[in-house]
Image (spheres, grey):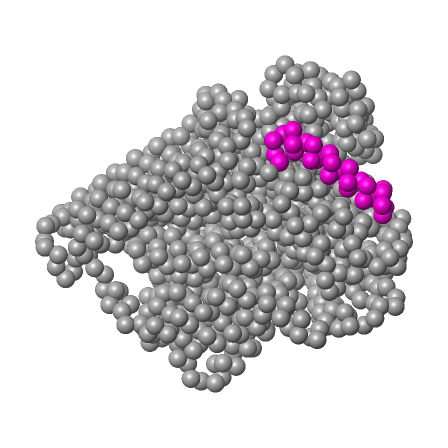
Amino acid sequence: MMKLMKSRLKGKMLCTLAAVSLSFGGLVQADEWPEDNIRLVVPYSAGGTTDLLSRKVADLLQKELTTVVVENRPGAGSTVATGQLARGGRGSDHMLLMASPGHTIGASLYPNLRYDPVADFAFVRNVINIPNVMVVPSDSPYNTVAEFVEAAREQQLSFSSPGIGSSIHMSGELFKNLTQTNLVHVPFRGSGEALPALLSGDVDVAFENMPTVYPHIQSGKLKALAVTTPTASEFLPDVPSMQQAGKGYGLESYETSAWFGLIAHKSFPEEGMAKLQAALDRVMAGEDFKKFLPQFGAEAGTVVGDDFRQFVQNELQKWSDVAEKANLKR
Amino acid sequence: MEKSELQFVAASESHYGRCNPNSVLGCAFSILALGFLFYVIPSHIEIPGQMQHPLLSPRFLPQLAGWLVLVLSLILMVDGLVTPPKRSEADEFRRGVPIMRQVLMVAAGVVYVLFFEELGAIGSGFLASVLLFLASDLRNIWVYALAIIFPAIVTLLFIYVLNVPLPPGTLWESLSLI
Amino acid sequence: MENFSEVLTLFLSVDNFLAIAAGVLVGVVVGAIPGLTATMAVALALPFTFSMEPVTAILLLVGIYKGGMYGGSITAILIRTPGSPASACTLLDGYPMAQQGKAKKALKTALYSSVVADMISNIALIFFASYLAKIALNFGPPEYFWLICFSLTIIVSVSGSSVVKGLIAAGLGIIVSTIGLDAVYGTQRLTFDNYNLMDRVSFIPLLIGLFAIPEVIEFYTSKVAPHIRTAVSGASLTWKEFKGLLKTIVRGSLIGVIIGAIPGTGATSAAFISYSEAKRTSPRKANFGKGEIEGVAAAESGNNGVAGATLIPLLSLGIPGDVITAIILGAFMIHGLTPGPVLFQENLTLVYALFCGIMVSSFVLVFVGNAAIRYFSLIADIPKTILLPIVLMFCIYGAYAVNNSTFDIALMLAFGVVGFVFNRTGIAAAPFLIGFILGPMFEDNLRRTMLISKGDLSIFFRGPITWVFVMLTVASLIFAIRRYWVARKEDALA
């Protein structure tokens, strides 16, 4: 409880400081980055996965660099906060945003966004990746991806998702495209609603996030057929990757995951970028970070800087194609 | 409506005539429902390329609700015409309200809707509260002090204790830049 | 029982008790602030729990959840501003009671109904979790579909003086709920190419707009009335009255437990179903909606009965039934725990320590609730000329905070005008709200069922649960129609 009070008080003081320094920060000529607190914007509401991951990263990052203030700015998917970052303005040299698949999927579904998801931003690095898992109910007759694809070409099967345009939905659409199968998308609102339908066998398959289905794979209520990352996951060592399991069925290039990475406004100072990347390297090499990952079935992110930009570009291309083929483009 | 009495008294003081809230409301809603069903739905709800079943159409529920409203509005209108409802006493209380009072209320709403980001949470809260206090003809100067203290405290509470961001006011920011 | 001592050592710590007390207090206060909800309070408290012990962290969040569920009813009763969607039902009779000078009685009724419901819900969680979880897993889309159909029949009993007008309001609510991107095809529906509407109409602005704002508009379009002191001077709830309400409360709690155990249905439906059931069986039917104490008890017990029960699918299956439990799931995960069957095998002591804490939180609610009533009822002594501008300010801030958008402020005020027109023309606002909440659930589950069955309609009657709800729906409709005709005949004779 004392801890609570203390951290609350500290947070309050820091925030006040942040606000004060924010209003004067713009006037001071920058000589060394960071001369101010870093603001990490979470484009979703407090309490979600993106929020949890961001707060942990912020916590670790501020031990290496300077105070990191997390700010939730939800709205219209993640596009409200992302649009604000793209506009830049005062304080944008100390502002980061935790981008996730919504960044690219949103942009490929709604072309009327007022920003370019690649050109308008500086890409710091990809911090965390959470694989998706292709799961079927335990009493499902399919035990391998091959069996499933064969069956899905013969008859209509269904896959669940926590909502249209989620990375889980798009993983399914990509699977459907590549394998030329007859899958029907059954949308739910949130994984909490989608999961019971899968457990009871009302839907045939799902491409859910690892942490959502991991306990059910463990307890034997779900069978994992494949993980969606290019290599097998350390959490499910016996489960093949989709690329392996789907050889000969068009899945050789299949790769999706829930990725999380930091992006900034395109005018982000170069000095800051270098320091930030170095600090993140130290964070990600630390024990704390490594201990934190398994709780979310997550893996450390790999791509940095321009590679990250390229990764986002590829993602954008991939989802645009999928959206086009699935008639999802608006 | 079901409370109205079934009798053919000529429009007395306590009853509305043919042109009563129910018949007018029913008529207005029927027109709205017709417009919704035959103009808004076809022009503003897209039909997807392929659809597995007509029940799956994005237009199904809006159409269902639209027809529901249409049918019920017609019932309401007919009912209002046949059995006009009683006049309520509250109506008297609503007469003779100074125009200025209502204008100031609308002005307060406008401040919030149009200038919330420009004036900031504190600024617009202050201005709108002052307008509303004026609308009630409050003369006590301390009440107006409240109008500045409350928005300030609440805003700071939202921002720093609850960590809910509220706009500081773009107007002030640009002023401080000069 | 060597485990028992382990449980106690894990649970009996100053930190835990402080966390529960602080949680309930924060929940009640935040829940009572217009525009802030229990969900928001839990989400905002989450980062503070990272550094705590797992049990302490989760108890803090559960405390906030329970406090928030009750806190929402305080402002609903006092100033017609529901702090949470579920308390929109409490408002139906609570606010009229406050206007009659019985605010204190209403607040106490709400508090004790909440506490009793909370306890019943806790007991269900502790003893029947695995059984209820099994039922919950049997709820597929067709079962949900019929549950929603049954829930829709409650519109009739919250329609106020005119069922026809109530149904019109419900229809309008359904239409508004379809605004946004289509859930299956992603096509635009009634968005008029406005970016702010793609993500559907936000709930909080609609809720506050429909109930709180009309009071403001009403006040400024009427003559200034002399201020009537209400809350503190009013009589409290007597033991005799409470005993009379007990049956309603228990029934409401059980409805809450069942609804709560089924993921994704929500406290709002529970509150309204409980209310409608109480009205159906009450000898004072006509007084419902005009300040009937039983209405308050039914709404609050239904609403709080959900609180413990939503933890059932979370703890036993790892399935979060609503946004709050999804956040609590996050708290479990941050501490390296995975709710679900595995939790019961590997961390049984922790589970029982949690149960202890959850029971204690109900008792804490009694004290915190009473204190809150004492201080919050002072609100009723503030003249409306000063109070309403401040309430409006809170509403505006709250509406803005949901999506950081001024569009939501405009939306809220627009719904305020709608609510005002409803008030003036005798249309009840509650059916609009129910239509708005249940409309999408109806459609979603209808479509999911069709998608799963590939168009085969027999799936709608696939098992005993569907039949139960089909029969409940039909029975409820027959009752409603019969009551309507009886009332009409009596009116005609009078």
Residue A169 against residue C400 in the figure, above or below: above
Q: Quadrant of residue A303?
A: top right
Q: Residue placed at 74% from the left, 53% from the top? A: A97
Q: Quadrant of residue A195?
A: top right
Q: Quadrant of the N terminus of chain C?
A: top right
The percent position of residue A299, horizontal first and vertical second, equals 81, 40
Q: Residue placed at 42% from the left, 67% from the top? A: B106
The percent position of residue C83, horizontal first and vertical second, equals 50, 58
Q: State how many labels appear.
A: 0
Q: Nearer the viewer, residue A263 or C170?
A: A263
The percent position of residue C378, horizontal first and vertical second, equals 46, 72
Q: Nearer the viewer, residue C340 or B68?
A: B68
Kindly tell me whether residue C28 is visible in this rendering.
no
Magenta region, residue range: A301-329
Residue A208 against residue A7 in the figure, above or below: above
Kindly tell me whether residue A49 is visible in this rendering.
yes
Task: Inspect the magenta stretch and tell me whether residue A187 lies in it.
Answer: no
Residue A107 against residue C401 in the figure, above or below: above
Q: Residue placed at 49% from the left, 72% from the top? A: B128
The percent position of residue A184, horizontal first and vertical second, equals 59, 26
Q: Main secondary structure of the magenta part?
A: helix
Task: Inspect the magenta stretch and tell me whether residue A312 lies in it.
Answer: yes
Residue A143 against residue C399 in the figure, above or below: above
Q: Residue placed at 22% from the left, 44% from the top? A: B78
